[in-house]
Image: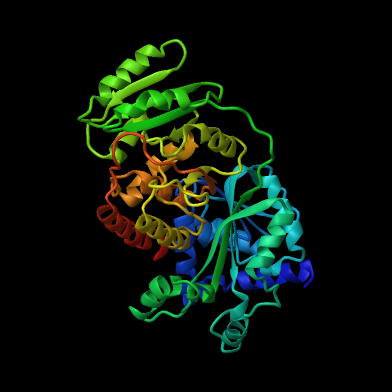
Amino acid sequence: MKKTDLIKYFDTLAETRDHWSERNWYYHSNLENLHTFIIPYGSNVLEIGSGTGSLLAALKPKKGVGVDISPKMISYAKEKFPNIDWREGDAENLEVGERFDYIVVSDLVGYLDDIERGFHELKKVSHERTRLVISYYNYLWEPLLQLAERLQLKAEQPLQNWMSHKDIEGMLELADFEIIKSGSKMVFPIWIPLISAFLNKIVGNLPFLSRLGVIQYAVARPKPTGVYQDKSVSIIIPARNEKGNIESAVKRTPVFGTHQEIIFVEGHSSDDTYEEIVRVADKYVGTRNIRYDRQSGKGKGDAMRKGYSMAEGEVIMILDADLTVPPEDLPKFYNAIISGRGEFINGSRLVYQLEDQSMRFLNILGNKFFSIVFTWLLGQRLKDTLCGTKVFTKSDYNLIAEGRPYFGDFDPFGDFDLIFGAAKLNLKIIEVPIRYQARTYGSTQIDRWTHGWLLLKMVAFAMRKIKFI
């Protein structure tokens, strides 16, 4: 369709757009719920193809800009939502002059004359931390949607580009964007009390069945440029009954970053761990920056939060004091995050051959099972949820902490608090394989049955708060 004909179509549709939106309120409600889950309130948001503005307004942006090719659509949007900046514009020739945290492209790609060019234009309004949120119809639904138009159950539309997920992914790659996560929603777009909620929130989110959702979506980010700068680093080591590992942790940790600090948080040990931390800190004064404190509460999660509050580095690293993850591997994590290849770096113990006695057989099976489950839950590959070594920036941790009320104080370990928070923020999660080693001092504080039950509870929790929404 020629662009002039497309403008004429949308100008005509503008007069009845709200009527059709109200008639198909259930679809539009689900679309809004998906976007409000992905995009935090108070963000700087640009929507391209904003129509009469309801979706952008539902996001409650700190700064919102809506762009649409139709003058009449923009006119209606200005009347309905005068607090948002509405502008006429062409998605294939953007002239916005600003950059945004989130860019929404909803039900638009089907109308673009040149989708690849449209994605290239998004670079003009993106910075290195921008997230694109693209939603589009599942091409499997084309016959049913055309039938709905003939039955006047939805507005008639001109012929569209019907794109598969792989098509979208390929065109984003050509425009130097990479998909962080993607999925489908809404297998039953008709409202029937109880039945619709059950089918869409539960059945429609199950593996394989989720591919049938009428709404397909992808969250993407600009590819890293490869240009990066060194950053300061805080290495947090929670330690309980680890006296024999304290000095080794310091001696074996390589020096990297513009500035490095090692923070021990001691957890009410019975083997003089705290006294050993004090001794080691005094011994290495002038050669290593070692800080320490005692946690006031209990559990690793509490100790880690104490460490985060003390950390002054731009990059935060967690290293378990049992040293089963070699401190010598920390530069791999550092390089992964400062290069931009990942924004939340997780260690994986399940790639290389394990040392004898480093992990029991049932623990290995459990870890592999939960790897599959959490990959499905989070929409990003995660092979080893319980590896203690995790790396992220202090600024991203602050955002995770700000978003904590959504999840609540649910995690005594502290691992899932970070993983779920990173997934909710659409951070790029990557894993660094490490060679997991057997303990040389002390005994494990992991109980396979107690902590296996905790993992099952985390699965149920994530289903409710992340997947079945």
Where residue 149 sits in the image (x, y, percent)?
A: 60, 84
Residue 272 versus residue 14: which sits nearer the camera? 272
- Rendered view: 139 above or below 417: below
- Rendered view: 225 above or below 236: below
* Image quadrant in which you'd find residue 67: bottom right
The count of marks equals 0
Is 327 left or right of 441, judged from the image as shown? right
* Image quadrant in which you'd find residue 282: top left
Whether residue 96 can be seen here: no
* Image quadrant in which you'd find residue 368: bottom left
Q: Residue furthest left?
A: 270
**The N terminus, quarter of image:** bottom right
Where residue 274 sits in the image (x, y, percent)?
A: 26, 23
Whether residue 74 can be seen here: yes
- Rendered view: 382 above or below 306: below
Where residue 78 sits in the image (x, y, percent)?
A: 56, 56
Residue 154 versus residue 276: which sits nearer the camera? 276
Q: Residue furthest front?
A: 356
**The C terminus, quarter of image:** bottom left
The residue located at (61%, 43%) in the rendering is 341
Residue 467 versus residue 261: which sits nearer the camera? 261
- Rendered view: 208 above or below 345: below
Residue 267 versus residue 11: which sits nearer the camera? 267
Where residue 146 sits in the image (x, y, percent)?
A: 62, 84
The residue located at (35%, 30%) in the rendering is 307
Display colour scheme: rainbow
